Amino acid sequence: MSKLNQIKLPINLEELSEQITQPAPNWKLVRERDGLTKQSAEVTWLEFREDGFFKEQYKEPAIGRSLLMSPFSPFFTWQTTVVTEIVEQREDYIKFNTENSVYELFKL
């Protein structure tokens, strides 16, 4: 019985992620306190059960939901804590408070 030789190549995950083609961003999220900015092609709003597990996914924001920015995978761009107040909302813009931050979301 022969042993199979495996070649191990070092991989820089940061460089690899930059090489992966991402769709053009359609959304920009800015955190008020420090200007942190995140962009994504898509956004979705998640609701969680009282035990912290996923309950439902929505296209529209609402109090009690968290914003999730694409890609929608374990490698998502950003997820906010739960929305506690919607300060202002238009078709292409929403300003909202979460449990620990104030955000502005712009449609690009």
Image: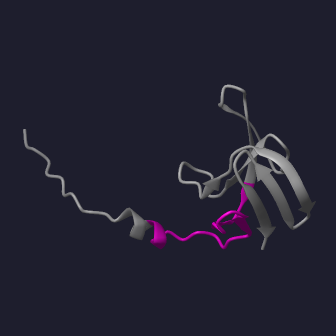
Q: Position of residue 73 (x, y in %)?
A: 58, 50
Query: Which of the colour schemes (rainbow, by chain, secondary structure, one colour) is used?
Result: one colour
- The residue under the point 58% across, 54% down is 76
Horizontal side of 89 relative to 68 (left or right) equals right
Q: Position of residue 82 (x, y in %)?
A: 74, 43
- The residue under the point 71% across, 53% down is 101
Q: Nearer the viewer, residue 82 or 99?
A: 99
Q: Position of residue 45 (x, y in %)?
A: 76, 48
Q: Position of residue 55 (x, y in %)?
A: 73, 33
Horizontal side of 74 relative to 14 (left or right) equals right
- The residue under the point 46% across, 72% down is 19
Does the segment drawn in magenta span residue 11?
no
In terms of image quadrants, where is residue 58?
Answer: top right
Q: Which residues are magenta?
A: 17-43
Above or below — where is 78 with respect to 108? Answer: above
Horizontal side of 60 relative to 100 (left or right) equals right
- Image quarter where the N terminus lies is top left
Does the segment drawn in magenta span residue 36?
yes
Extreme residue in the top direction: 51
Above or below — where is 56 with respect to 6? Answer: above
- Image quarter where the C terminus lies is bottom right
- The residue under the point 40% across, 70% down is 15
Q: Nearer the viewer, residue 29 or 32?
A: 32
In terms of image quadrants, where is residue 53?
Answer: top right
Extreme residue in the left direction: 1
